[in-house]
Image (tube, rainbow, N blue to C red):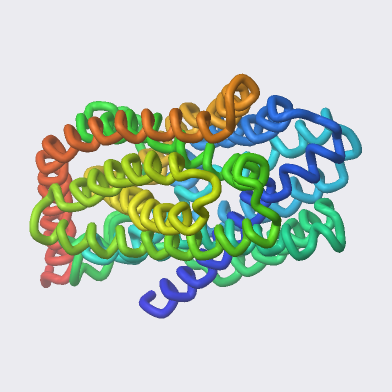
Amino acid sequence: MHKNRWIAVVIFFTFMLLHQSDKLLIGPLTTPIMETFGIDEVAMGAVFTGALILGAIMYPVWGYLYDRYSRPRLLALASAIWGSTTWLSAIAPTYPSFLATRATTGIDDSSYPGIYSLISDYFGPELRGKIYGLLQLTQPLGYLVGLIAATLLSGLMGWRAVFYITGSLGLILAVFIFFFVKDAPRGQAEPEMAGIDEQVEYKFEWGKARGLFRKRSLLLLYAQGFVGVFPWNIITYWFFRYLETERDYSEGAILMTMAPAILVLAFGYFLGGVLGDFFFKRTPRGRLLVALTGVLSGAVLLFLTMNVPVENQSLFMILMLATAIFIPLAAPNVLSTVYDITLPEVRSTALSVQYFIESAGAAAAPLLAGIIATQSTLGNAILSLSVVAWLLGAVFLAVTAYLAPADIHSLREEMGRRAKVEIALQDAQTSPA
């Protein structure tokens, strides 16, 4: 299992990197797509929002399936859906058909809880933050790969050809996941289960799933998620066009500006996971305090960045890099905290609810930003929505940090009780009749 888990991490990293590239390509390709179909920002915002809405709807479905059935098989299916729906959006001849087919790409966008749940059964709490941070590198790195692909290939091949390439990669990865990723007993990596060779298989139960909504710290994380991803969706889908239209950056200048920022952002995910694990060993509030620091610092630094005069590109670059190091610190720590307080057999469901709420809250973000942009500017839309969302999220994180230790202790007590039952069963089986 030790070797298999690292093979799975490599495959998951590749899957998420290429999937994020495909998902986020539409940001850099926004202008040529708008020109192809002759649409404005509101219509393009509807394209972004359509995929987010369908992805939100699918989160509970994927979560339930992951907690009931083989996670590797379902992840292979998700990769195949990714490839197929991307191909459909590439061949769409009209705006209505593109709007519909691009929305179907949201089906596989909600498949990540299965990956994170499986990782929680490969690695214990002391390592999860680092692994989650490593996997979450794929979001900014995927954006960078997509940015480079869009810049270099779309002019030569057209935006449709770029989607043909990424869709084909999804189909290839489905085969790798199916044959090389192995499932694991749910809960086997919990510290209380160390040294227990065979475990009782705890199954998904609706009562346990309903119990998620009685955990105060989890409910607060859900509330934080509702507002916390507003900025991510706005920045992801509109920042490229903001640089292009309101700061008069050329394609080359955008690439030279965004590439360093994305690399710093990627490092911030891994740094957040490392810091979260470090402080979690010292206090059960450690992960959430790191997350809170990231959110507050990101809000302040984004405000300063967006108010830099257009002609001062050097200062804009410096502040953007500073912003990029802080804003991802929360992501691996919120994810790890969800698993620090939930039972192994309902973890996919718990995270799916988290992501469902995030997606439901964020689905309107690109469209809302587009509407504000038509009345004001993209810069004002990005700044106002992002700062307000992060400040609200900081309040929820602060209260969660106060309450979380009780729910963490409750989980550890339950896993300790289960370990005693496992040991008693093993002793009974090995004792002479």
* Residue 74 percent coordinates (x, y): 57, 52
Q: Residue at x 22, y 61 (%)?
A: 277
Residue 214 versus residue 18 in the image, above or below? above
* Residue 260 percent coordinates (x, y): 50, 65
Q: Residue at x 32, y 48 (%)?
A: 330
Q: Residue at x 12, y 59 (%)?
A: 424
Nearer to me, 185 or 133: 133
Q: Quadrant of residue 175?
A: bottom right
Nearer to me, 82 or 230: 230
* Residue 270 percent coordinates (x, y): 36, 64
Q: Is residue 156 left or right of residue 50?
A: right
Residue 57 versus residue 155 in the image, above or below? above
Can you see residue 378?
yes
Residue 108 versus residue 383 in the image, above or below? below
Q: Is residue 308 left or right of residue 197?
A: right
Q: Residue at x 62, y 50 (%)?
A: 24
Can you see residue 136?
no
